Amino acid sequence: MFSLSAKTALITGAGAGIGASIARLFAQQEALVWVIDRDAAAAQQVVREITSGGGVARAAEVNVSDDSGVDTLADQVGPIDILVNNAGIGHVGNLLQTTAADLDRLHAVNTRGPFNLCRTFVPTMLERESGSVINLASVGGVVALRDRLAYTTTKFAVVGLTKALALDHSHTGVRFNAICPGRVETEFVQNMIAQYPDPQHAYREMAATQLNGRMARPEEIAAAALYLASDASAMVTGSTLMIDGGWSAGK
């Protein structure tokens, strides 16, 4: 049901965390996977892991906010069937702690990045009348997060971008959906928690945000991406899939 055989998938920010988990799972389901990251060494490491397990993957170094870099990537990759816009960055701060430069920096990656990839790769999908675009937003793209003004603003924009694309191209065979995770226990989060004076307390506080009392695993987000990438979700477009352990249930 979830086979991606004979399909080509491109995943940004796939050198670690959620993106790497998506790349590995898609490769297990027989997709040819392009691992895209601004960290070339990290992307190559994920490719080595995939190929050592019998999968097919290639790596490319790209900054998603760079229009010309994305155009060059398209020349290298060619047509794709699945686009996962996963690359993203964060910022901590309210209005008084956020500069215009902070907002512009997050906008360039979190909002303009997905736009750049869609602008470049979606036209071919439209010509072929087939394709799945998955944008990684956040619970912070549906409900506001305290002291995350720039991040919340850009993730709301990702949800809006997804819905606009789905509406504009609803009869084309190309689908556009967003995944909105809550807190996910990636290596980055684990390393951040380890820096706190009391890491166990910090972990419990972060986990308690989810109503089920734990953070998500990257593999759980990847499973949702696989569903949206596969033909099993043929009737799903313009959707915002929450994977937040109930965080937003009462908001």
Image (spheres, helix red, strand yellow):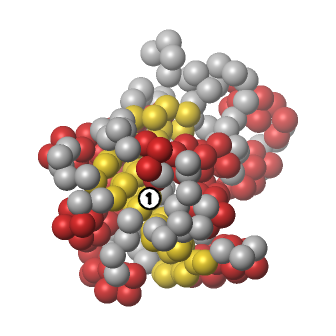
For badge 1, the amino acid type reads: Val
Instruction: In the displayed orientation, state which residue is furthest to the front.
Output: 1
Total marks in image: 1
Q: Quick check: 83 left or right of 38?
A: left
| 142 lies above or below 237 | above
Residue 213 x %, y %: 73, 23
Look at the picture and state if 246 lies above or below 66: above
Determine whether, in the image, residue 226 is placed left or right of residue 131: right
- Would you identify the image quadrant in which residue 69 lies? bottom left
Residue marked by disc 1: 84
Q: Note whether 31 is above or below 173 in the view shown.
A: below
Q: Residue at x 56, y 51 (%)?
A: 2
Q: Residues within 10 Å of mark 1 (few under 14, many from 20)?
A: many
Q: Nearer the viewer, residue 99 or 215?
A: 215
Q: Secondary structure at mark 1?
A: strand
| Quadrant hosting residue 39 | bottom right
Q: Position of residue 79 (x, y in %)?
A: 33, 76
Residue 173 location in percent, x, y?
25, 52
Q: Position of residue 13 (x, y in %)?
A: 51, 64
- The residue closer to the viewer here, 67 or 108, is 67
Q: Which residue corresponds to the image point at 30% horizontal and 59% vertical from the top-left? A: 130
**Residue 38 horizontal side relative to residue 98, left or right:** right
Among the 4 quarters of the image, the one containing residue 167? top left
The structure residue drawn at horizontal position 30% and vertical position 38%, both measured from the top left corner, is 238
Pick the residue in front: 214 or 198: 214
Instruction: Look at the picture and state if 133 lies above or below 56.
Output: above
Q: Is residue 52 visible?
A: yes
Q: Residue furthest left?
A: 168
Instruction: Please tell me which residue lies in front, 126 or 135.
Output: 126
x 39%, y 35%: residue: 240
Q: Is residue 110 visible?
A: no
Q: Quadrant of the C terminus?
A: top left
